[in-house]
Amino acid sequence: MVSVGVDYIKPIWLVAYRLIIGAMLVTAYAYYKGQRLPKLSDVRWRWYCLLGLTGSALPFFFLSIGQMSVDSGLTAIIVGSMPLMTIILAHFFAQEYLNARKLIGFVIGFIGIVILFLPEDFSFSLVGDWRAQLLILFSAFLYAVTTIIAKHVPKTPSSTGAAMMLICAAIISTLYGIYDGVPRQIPPAIGLWMMIGLSIGSTAIATILYLYVIEQKGPSMMAKINYFVPVTSVIFGCFLLGEDFSWRMVLSFIIIAVGVMIAQAQKKNAAINP
């Protein structure tokens, strides 16, 4: 939906629209569940404003710009490197320290990322859209940062936290959109449908589920879920958008997935044998 949407709506406004609608939907849902937003003086607003910046506003914007020239399947594979970055950040900020297994897994996964930046002939030059891919990689880094921050946020119901997060993100993106220039015409219907789909599914529902899974199962479960995203994105990209299928993408995904599995294997063993 992002790949199609950016063809009809300016990236910053595609982000602003989906966040505004997503924030309205999630806030309504939170109130329907009998929850209320805390006072503005509540410290949780600071936490969720930070989450809104690193987990929604900035990565949505960078992904939208990146997908103006990068296929959706390749985008998902690059974003799938997020667990590798989480491993490094967790060493410094979550007391989940690096060991030899995690380091080996990170190096293997990093090789998979590097392959995505090389041309089809694997020469040592960079692909033409490496700058766009770098923006997408930075989005993955921001998602990793968000996962670490989410572990330290004061306990809050997932729907309330999602509402606070999206409200802050919507304000940030809208202010930047106004600064960048207000659209003067209504986008075509296909652009509007993509915006609505992103607002309901990939913003409102996904943010609630994201915070709920972290609350119930921790960041490691989010890393496992990430294996599913590149596969489905490549399939839908090829069949629905006519994107090119590349064995290089398959190779990169396998290498990244193996790296993540190796890096996380120690954590699983440690849980079994404390």
Image (tube, rainbow, N blue to C red):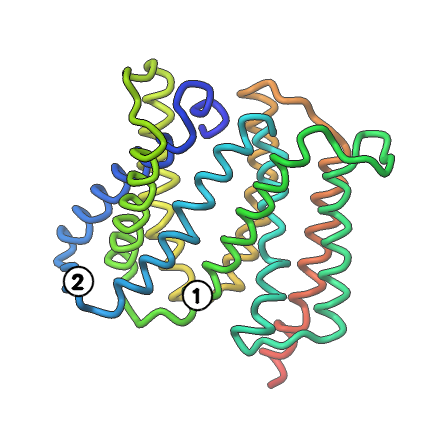
Mark 2 lies on residue: 40
- Is the C-beta separation of discs 1 and 2 under 8 Å? no
- x and y, in percent, of residue 206 in the image: 38, 46
Pointer 1 or 2: first along the chain: 2
Rendered position, 47 above or below 15:
below
Residue 107, placed above or below residue 253: below
Residue at point 56%, 70% (across, down): 90
Amino acid at the residue labelled 1 = Ile
- Asked whether 254 or 124 is in front, the reply is 124
Identify the residue under disc 1: 149
Q: Is residue 247 left or right of residue 73?
A: right
Say which of 94 and 258 sits in front: 94
The percent position of residue 104, horizontal first and vertical second, equals 77, 65
Q: Quadrant of the N terminus?
A: top left
Q: Which amino acid type corresponds to the residue marked 2 in the rendered image?
A: Leu
- View extreme (front): residue: 179
Residue 265 appears left or right of 49: right
How would you rate the neighbour count of disc 2 (Cα within 10 Å): few for under 14, some for 14-19, many for 20 or more?
A: few
* Left or right, residue 30 beside residue 82: left
Q: Residue at x 57, y 41 (%)?
A: 136
Q: Is residue 38 left or right of residue 69?
A: left
> Which residue occupies 14% across, 59% down?
36
Please tell me in which quadrant of the rendered image residue 60 appears.
top left
Q: How dense is the environment of label 1, judged by Cα within 10 Å: few (below 14), some, or many (20 and up)? A: some
State the SS at label 1: helix
